[in-house]
Amino acid sequence: MRKRSLIPIIYIVFLMLPIYWLVAMSFKTTNEILGGFSLFPQDFTLENYAKIFTDSTWYSGYINSLIYVVTNTILSVAVALPAAYAFSRYRFLGDKHLFFWLLTNRMAPAAVFALPFLQLYSAVGLFDTHIAVALAHTLFNVPLAVWILEGFMSGVPKELDETAYVDGYSFPRFFVRIFIPTIAAGIGVACFFCFMFSWVEMLLAKTLTSVDAKPIVATMTRTASTSGYELGLLAAAGTLTIIPGAFVIYFVRNYIAKGFALGRV
């Protein structure tokens, strides 16, 4: 029994070690980081965090990222819900081919779409806006959300729909009042994966923005100075980027557990 309990402990320590190292580096100066090996900060400093919270270049990056990530998550799930319902409840010509085509969009690398999106958004005046990045990320998140939600919806008996119609429910009322609460776990899982992809994706976010909507992932790539990279500042920014994902995991933790057990994930 001790050996069985030892393996998860070793795994958790191994998993948390890079996170601890990142947090420890955020309280160090760049000179201390480059000066030698130390488990704890020898010259503890909050200067790195102070710069992030007082410099608009840094804190606006987090605000911009949250705006387009939340927008993308809402758009992706809102579009995926009726699409997944159609795939789970109806059979039509080419349905399997269309479903596979959606997944191929998710499989394609973001670099394939960077230049077309850049030219398109520049032509229509959407370049360097939050909605530009949000719409670009829907190309990848909608297929993922459809795939996840379709698995949950297929697990709901069709008799539920028929019973609701017999009881006099219109389709919009049935879908919002009965069906969506039934697949709440699937929606939580879909929101989690959409949020995390959009939060960490860098290529499209950096290509489609320049100043007004520049996200934190793009700001973090510009920490070089005449004396080299500001490693302490970069570690502090990296530590702060973990916090939104941790909050999302906390609030949808029960849905994620059900999603791994019941859905396609």
Image (cartoon, grey):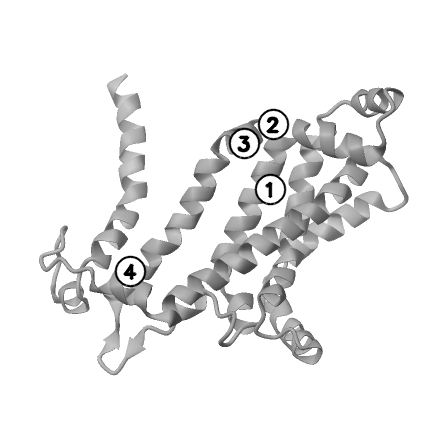
> Residue 262 shows which numbered tag?
2
Label 3 sits on a secondary structure element that is: helix
Q: Please say if the residues under marks 3 and 1 sit with CB atoms less than 8 Å apart.
A: no
Q: Amino acid at mark 1?
A: Ala
Q: Amino acid at mark 4?
A: Ala
Q: Name the mark nearer the viewer: 2 or 1.
A: 1
First-in-chain label (3 vs 4): 4
The number of numbered badges drawn on the structure is 4
Q: Quadrant of residue 135?
A: bottom right
- What is the distance, in whole Å, between disc 3 and disc 4 at their CAs? 31 Å
First-in-chain label (2 vs 3): 3
- What is the distance, in whole Å, between disc 3 and disc 1 at their CAs? 10 Å
Towards the viewer: 62 or 189? 62
What is the x, y in percent for residue 20? 25, 48
Q: Amino acid at mark 2?
A: Leu
Q: Which residue is mark 3?
A: 255
Work out which residue is located at the far left of the displayed protein and give it.
42
- What is the distance, in whole Å, between disc 2 and disc 4 at their CAs? 37 Å
Q: Which residue is mark 4?
A: 235
Position of the N terminus by quadrant:
top left
Q: Residue at x 49, y 55 (%)?
A: 199
